[in-house]
Image: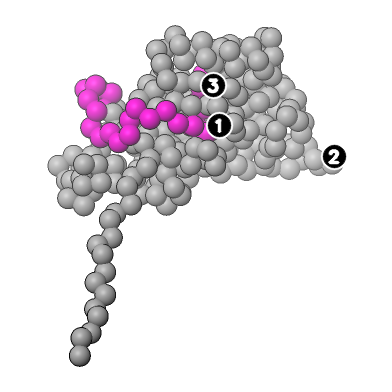
Amino acid sequence: MMVNVAVAKPVRPTPNTDSVLLLNTTTHKIELERNGDRVRAIASITKIMTAMVTLDYDKDLSRRLTLTRRVGSHLPRQQYTREQLLEAMLVKSDNGAAETLAEDYPGGRSAFIKEMNRHAERWDLKHTRFEDASGLGAGNTSTVHDVAAMMTTAANYWFIRDTSTKKQVAFETRYRKQIRTIRLGHTSGNILFTFDNIIVSKTGLTSHAGWCVGLVAEQNAQQYVIVVLGSRNKAERLNTVKNIMYNHVLDQNLQPQEFVNTYN
C-alpha cells in the first residue's frame, strides 16, 4: 500500500521592509544601511524640524500662545509658554503643540511650512518634503539619510538636546478654577530607559509611516545617528534599535551572526 506523505516546503523569512541607517558622524562612516534610498513618510520625526524652525524664528521661550483647535492635543485648550509647547511636542509628540507653534510664525502656518522646506533645501535634504508641522499627514517624506542629517543638525540645538531625552515633563495648568499638574511621558520611554547615552530622540507613528524613530547617541567620544523608518510594530522598532545599540555602538567587537544576516 502506498502512503502519500506531505512534505512541508521551507518557509522563507519575511523580507525586511523597513529602512534602517546607522551613521557614525564622527568618522563619517555608514555602519549599517537597509533600504536607505527609499522615500517614505516620517510621521512625528517631522517635529524635530518644527522645533528647529521655531527656535530659529524666536529665542523667547516665555511668550504665551493659545493652544490651537486645528488638531487634537493632550493639553487642555488654554495658553502655554512656547517652552511648554516645545516640551509637549518633543516629549509627548503633541500635535496641538506643533500646530500652535506653526500658527505663531510670521505669515501663519503656511509660511511656517514653507520655512520648514527652505530649511531642508538649505541643509541639502534633497529627498525631504514637509506639508504640515506635526507629521500627521502622509506628505511629510524623507529618507533615512536625510533624517540622519536632520537629527545631526538638531543635536547642535541645546534646547532640543536638553528636552528631547527627558523621560517626563510636568507643568501646572488651570482647569475649572483649579490648578492641576499635567505630566507627559516620553514616547521613546522604553528606549530612553534602556540606554543612557542618547542625546536626541524622536519617535513617529502613522498608518502611512509605520513605527519610526530617530536617535543621536554618544559613545566612546564618538557620535552615532540611528534612524528606523517603517517598522511593522513597536516591538520590531525597539528590537532593531537594541540590536544596533548592543552590537554596533556599545560593543563594536560583538556582532552575532543572526543579527548580521538581517542586513545582508
Residue to which mark 2 is pinned: 177
Q: Secondary structure at mark 3?
A: loop
How packed is label 3: few (under 14 Cα within 10 Å), some, or many (20 or more)?
A: many
Residue range corresponding to the magenta coloring: 24-52
- The amino acid marked with disc number 1 is Ala
Which sits in the foreground, 132 or 47?
Answer: 132
- Check the image and report above or below for 79 versus 237: above
Q: Is residue 40 magenta?
A: yes
Q: Are marks 3 and 2 in contact (CB under 8 Å)?
A: no
Q: Earlier in the sequence, mark 3 or mark 1?
A: 3
Residue 206 is left or right of residue 246, and the answer is right
Q: CA distance from mark 3 to mark 1?
A: 9 Å
Can I make out residue 172 in this image? no
Residue 12, numbered circle: none
Mark 2 or mark 1: which comes first in sequence?
Answer: 1
Which of the 4 image quadrants contains residue 82? top right
From the image, tell me which residue sits under label 3: 130
Question: Mark 2 or mark 1: which is in front?
Answer: 1
Residue 4 to residue 70: above or below: below
Residue ranking furthest to the right: 177
As for residue 236 lying within the magenta part, the answer is no
In which quadrant is the N terminus drawn? bottom left
Amino acid on which disc 3 is placed:
Phe
Please name the residue shown 60% across and 42% down the image: 184
Location of mark 1 (residue): 138
The residue positioned farthest toward the bottom in the image shown: 1
CB atoms of marks 2 and 1 within 8 Å: no
